Amino acid sequence: MKKVGILGGTFDPPHIGHLIIANEVLHAKKLDEIWFMPNQEPPHKMKSGDVTNAHRVDMVQLSIEAHTSFRIQTIEMDREGKSYTFDTMKLLEEAYPDIDFYFIIGADMVEYLPKWYKIQELLKMVQFISVNRPKYELETDYPVQYVKVPDINISSSLIRERVKAGETISFLVRDAVKRYIEENRLYEA
Ligand SMILES: Nc1ncnc2c1ncn2[C@@H]1O[C@H](COP(=O)(O)OP(=O)(O)OP(=O)(O)O)[C@@H](O)[C@H]1O
Ligand SMILES: O=C(O)c1ccc[n+]([C@@H]2O[C@H](COP(=O)([O-])O)[C@@H](O)[C@H]2O)c1
């Protein structure tokens, strides 16, 4: 069976932390591919105001281009309302019966797992792989695998704050994403 790791996210914007954890898990778990899956509406937080779904999809595409094992999966863009992972994984399992799915989450999401929609059913469907993230605990009673990654203290919030303050985001996002943010004047207000 083909093994695919899904990195679901808001990607507002995608940063190098996303790329590093995807690559670390790809190799540590010997997966065939990582699918970056931008959500339509994050279940537990707000998207920033001026950034459309199309912008986030474009930026994910620019982030992963030239990486042979990284793909984008836009299934959540086709569904209105909050993007519950249980609903999405059900559709993906039906569409790809020959793929073994893993769902990658940072430590902030591990803490939040008890509040996920239909978490017990979801745990039966996919295997979760967690990665460390500075300032968050990885302890959980749920059956979650763990891949140790270099600590990366970067978040999309940090990128948005820096752009707003007129500070540099070089090397924190891919160059093409930096150019896209500048050209479309995202996160300035
Ligand atoms: N620096 C990081 N280290 C480990 N995991 C991360 C890191 N950044 C993001 N992740 C994980 O990647 C997934 C998608 O993250 P998301 O797109 O929400 O970015 P974010 O940086 O957490 O955004 P925001 O700052 O807006 O909350 C989540 O599972 C999150 O835990
Ligand atoms: O299904 C849920 O209840 C649920 C709750 C919180 C987060 N998620 C998913 O976890 C992934 C990371 O979330 P986020 O908001 O940090 O980008 C993303 O794919 C979300 O849709 C899913």
Image (cartoon, rainbow, N blue to C red):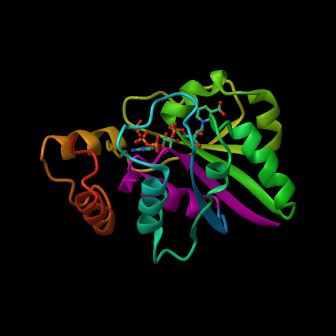
Does residue 75 appear anywhere in the picture?
yes
Q: Vertical placement of 5 versus 121: above or below?
A: below
Residue 139 visible in the current orientation: no
Q: Where is residue 73 in the image (x, y as percent from the top left)?
A: 62, 60
Instruction: Note whether 90 is above or below 171 in the view shown.
Output: above
Is 121 drawn above or below residue 23 in the view shown? above
For the N terminus, give its image quadrant.
Answer: bottom right
Q: Where is residue 40 in the image (x, y as percent from the top left)?
A: 57, 44
Query: Which quarter of the picture shows residue 126?
Result: top right
Whether 26 is drawn above or below 169: the answer is below
How far across and how far down the image is residue 58, in percent? 45, 62
Give the residue furthest to the left: 166
Is 59 situated left or right of 81 in this image?
Answer: left
Exactly how many numbered labels are in the figure? 0
Q: Residue at x 64, y 58 (%)?
A: 29
Position of residue 189 in the picture relative to residue 135 (left or right): left
Q: Is residue 118 left or right of residue 147?
A: right
The residue at the point 76 percent across, 40 percent down is 87
In magenta segment, residue 161? no
Viewer-side residue, 57 vs 80 = 80
Instruction: Point out residue 6 in the picture as x, y percentages from the top left corner.
Output: 63, 53
- Tell me the quadrant of ligand 1: top left
Residue at 71% x, 27% y is 117
Residue at position x 63%, y 67% from top?
A: 33
Where residue 80 sits, quadrant-wise, is: top right
Q: Give the range drawn in magenta.
A: 1-29
Quadrant of the snapshot with the C terminus: top left
Residue 3 part of the magenta segment: yes
